[in-house]
Image: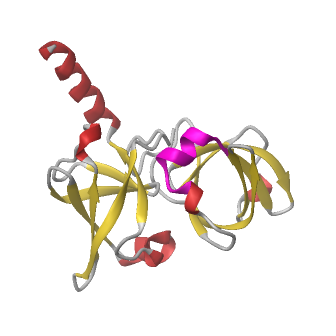
């Protein structure tokens, strides 16, 4: 379980392909505090630490994860948003985030709002996910509030602190991002679907 509040921005030190798997070696300041079997969200994707060496740790993404997220596009030297699992009793500063990416979206616009930056995204509506204005959305692991909501699009306003301390500063129009839709909204939608069926 995560909150969508990014702790660190890590750097991809090395990438190894192993059949259908991808082993990511990540350099991060909090690596000495990690232990094997611990969960860490990478751009919103929950992965298990499998090895640690000094300030670099290793995680493995399987084929399904690579197909549903943007992790397969990472290259050596790329930056990733990182968050360790929430501890029981911690404040929930963002919203409930599972670390299970629902689908990806494409950045369609970036505009300066004189104090914040507005990022717009489009996603495939066929899967059935949706946003609501003022609802929660997780973009590359960052807990955000939806500003504008369309059938297959939404925007979020990023404050300067978040822009500087996450990978949002590197996003461009055309960049692909990971989305995790609000888990409570997904359960409500599923219950409604079952009652209708």
Residue 118: tell me if it is visible: no
Choose between 128 and 110: the one closer to the eye: 128
Tell whether position 74 is magenta. no
Furthest residue toward right: 53
What residue is rendered at 58% in x and 64% in y? 80
Q: Secondary structure of the magenta portion, mostly?
A: helix
What residue is rendered at 59% in x and 70% in y? 79
Specify whether 73 is left or right of 97: right
Estimate the x, y position of residue 161 in percent, counting from the top left. Answer: 42, 75
Estimate the x, y position of residue 159 in percent, counting from the top left. Answer: 33, 73
Number of numbered discs on residues: 0
How was this image coloured? secondary structure
From what the image shows, is residue 98 above or below residue 7?
above
From what the image shows, is residue 110 above or below residue 73?
below
Residue 186: tell me if it is visible: yes
Estimate the x, y position of residue 61 in percent, counting from the top left. Answer: 64, 45
Question: Which region shows up in magenta?
Answer: 61-71
From what the image shows, is residue 72 above or below residue 189?
below
Choose between 111 and 96: the one closer to the eye: 111
Specify whether 170 is left or right of 108: right
What residue is rendered at 64% in x and 68% in y? 75
Choose between 66 and 116: the one closer to the eye: 66
Quadrant of res 172: bottom left
What residue is rendered at 71% in x and 48% in y? 59
Estimate the x, y position of residue 117 in percent, counting from the top left. Answer: 29, 77
Q: Quadrant of the C terminus?
A: top left
């Amino acid at each position: 379980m995560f909150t969508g509040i990014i702790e660190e921005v890590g750097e991809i030190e090395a990438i190894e392909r192993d059949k259908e798997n991808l082993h990511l070696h990540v350099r991060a300041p909090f690596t000495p505090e990690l232990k094997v079997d611990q969960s860490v969200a990478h751009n919103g994707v929950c992965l298990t630490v499998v090895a640690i060496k000094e300030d670099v740790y290793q995680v493995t993404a399987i084929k399904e994860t690579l197909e549903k997220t943007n992790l397969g596009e990472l290259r050596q030297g790329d930056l990733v948003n990182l968050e360790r699992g929430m501890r029981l009793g911690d404040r929930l500063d963002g919203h409930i985030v599972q670390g299970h990416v629902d689908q990806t979206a494409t950045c369609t616009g970036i505009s300066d709002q004189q104090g914040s930056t507005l990022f717009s995204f489009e996603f495939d509506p066929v899967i059935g996910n949706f946003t609501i204005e003022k609802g929660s959305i997780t973009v590359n692991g960052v807990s955000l509030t939806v500003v504008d909501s369309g059938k297959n699009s939404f925007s979020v306003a990023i404050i300067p602190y978040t822009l500087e301390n996450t990978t949002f500063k590197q996003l461009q129009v055309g960049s692909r991002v990971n989305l995790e839709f609000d888990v409570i909204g997904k359960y409500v939608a599923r219950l409604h679907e079952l009652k209708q069926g």
